[in-house]
Amino acid sequence: MQNVAIELESTPEVIDCREPATHAPLGKVPVDGPDVVRAKVARARVAQKSWGESTFSERRRLLKTILAHVLDHADELCEVVVRDAGKTRENAVMGEIWPVCEKLRWTIANGEKHLRPERMSSGLFLHKKATVLYQPLGVIGVICPWNYPLQNVLGPTIPALFAGNSVVVKVSEQVAWSSARMQRIFDEAFDALGYPKDTVQIVNGYGETGAALVRSGVDKVIFTGSVPNGRRIIEGSVENITPVILELGGKDAFIVCEDAHMEQAVHAALTGVFIAAGQNCMAAERVLVHAKVYDDFVGRLVSEVKKLRVGDAPQGAVDVGALVSPQQVEIVERLVNDAVESGARVLVGGKRGDRPGQFFEPTVLVDVTPDMAIMNEEVFGPVMCVHRYETDDEAIEIANGTRFGLGSTVMSRSGTRARRLAERLRVGSCTINDFGFTYMAQDLPFGGVDASGFGRLNGREGLRGCTNQKAILEDRLPLHMPAKLYPVKPEVYPLVRGVLRTLYQPTLTGRAKAVVELAKNLRR
Ligand code: NAD
């Protein structure tokens, strides 16, 4: 076992960046302390004044410029995230570039439709018209994890910008090296449009830098990360009553019914577990397989997992990359060892990779039980836990049996059954007969319930989540009839009671009686 935890030279002032796959040094990135964070938020607030007044057409131009940049520099950006996060090039292009391009395309095509003033019913007030304005909030603080260095930054920043906000992004200390390259994407786009570069600023640092951003007076925080830090975000947000969106961890269930197409199920499960070496919030962490097809599924799976190539190698030559940090390898190792000690069996892998760099062998564990730590805590590594079930009720009970509720998958040839299972899962999303596509269908909201967080990214909900949804009720006609309440007269109370009965009595006879009563009151 050559995989030793390296001593990083990181200090509170500097982050020592290294490649997870080779431990090769990448460089040192200065830490932004609370003063720098506050100063950047202040500059972002100034920049927002002009950006907040931009037209939708200018905002589309900005996103088109960013899209062109991402496409033109896709190879370079892939190289950057591969080196910084240890992922494979295929995961970089499919898991980073593609979703970002799709999000940009979707926002360019649909953003204005969801953010332009929306006419609503004015209810009782027929003489008024009602509208919702979707106005910028101001400065949005985005706090990112490390697993997708490009997508984690652009994913929340695109809707925040399109809604007219400025953004200060705190990137993860694990991938601080790539942050300068990410900053360039925005700098060039704002330069090209003639808007201030301060509209998007990236800050680097550890937890303290993130905590300073939460407390800096930003108008909203979009946090993506772990549950313990999600709690800290809520604590920090109390000070200024800052609204937050929390996109936290998951423990997603992947349910394989006995009528599933086996080859499709096996390959979707392989993607679900081993993409990004399992460091995916929506990873298929618990694979639940119907007893009737369990042996067939596990047999096919094992033979496929044995073929997976691990390492840091040129394009197309490895399937599973590195884990981001020595600590992440330790978490995976601890959970696998604990499961084995509690009775689980390793069919493939089960240990650290036998090469330098932070690798863990693609692993298949069977005989896991719902009470094991590995079935309840996030693994965030290339480990497939396969659990046998007998009935749909049992599958639902196990699937809903953790504190998380992010994504899920159901594999079945019966659309009705799959849909019924999806409806019964307590989660933010479910993909039927594929893995994770809900995230790529950008019209759909993305987010979780319970310990997986709250609030939504993506889609109309994600865009509007970056706005002040302001209600306006205005005159339809210039009829200036004063509604004089004061001084209050004794007949007001019975009159209003009569009006209430007239309007809200559930039966027609009740309402007719109320009208008669009201007429009497009015005569008096
Ligand atoms: P993490 O919580 O350790 O860190 C996330 C970010 O929060 C980092 O930038 C970190 O520096 C910052 N931070 C740490 N302490 C802070 C504090 N007190 N105040 C403010 N910021 C603070 O998470 P991670 O290890 O980087 O990422 C992995 C986690 O992220 C997993 O749990 C994963 O499931 C989750 N995740 C969720 C989604 C989602 O969309 N739901 C997506 C990706 C990752």
Image (cartoon, helix red, strand yellow):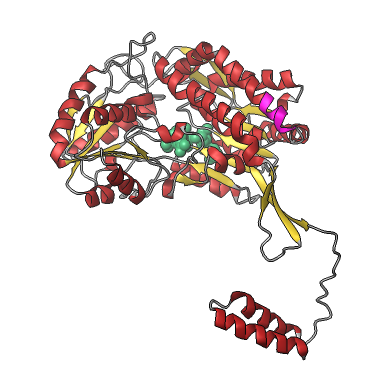
Task: Give residue 154's position: percent from left, percent from top.
Answer: 56, 28
Tell me if 88 is positioned left or right of 12 in this view. left
Question: Could you say which is closer to the camera, residue 395 or residue 442?
Answer: 442
Quadrant assignment, res 459 = top right
Prevailing secondary structure of the magenta residues: helix
In the rendered image, residue 479, in percent from the top left (x then y), is placed at 85, 63
Q: Residue furthest bottom?
A: 524
Closer to us: 439 or 180: 439
Looking at the figure, which quarter contains the C terminus? Answer: bottom right
Q: Is residue 9 magenta?
A: no
Any magenta on residue 59?
Answer: yes
Residue occupying the far top of the picture: 314
The residue drawn where x is 66% and y is 87% is: 516
Q: Give the x, y percent position of residue 424.
A: 33, 51
Q: Quadrant where the N terminus lies? A: top left
Say if residue 337 shows up in the picture. Answer: yes
Q: How many marks?
A: 0
Q: Dividing the picture into quarters, in which one does residue 268 lie?
A: top left
Seen at 60% across and 80% down, the residue is 511
Q: Which residue is at 66% across, 27% downward? A: 60
Direction from residue 92 to residue 459 in the image, left or right? right
Q: Which residues are magenta?
A: 55-61
What x and y, as percent, mark residue 507? 53, 78
* 146 and 117: which is toward the camera: 117
> Looking at the image, can residue 209 be seen?
no
User: Of residues 320 and 55, which is closer to you in this image?
Assistant: 55
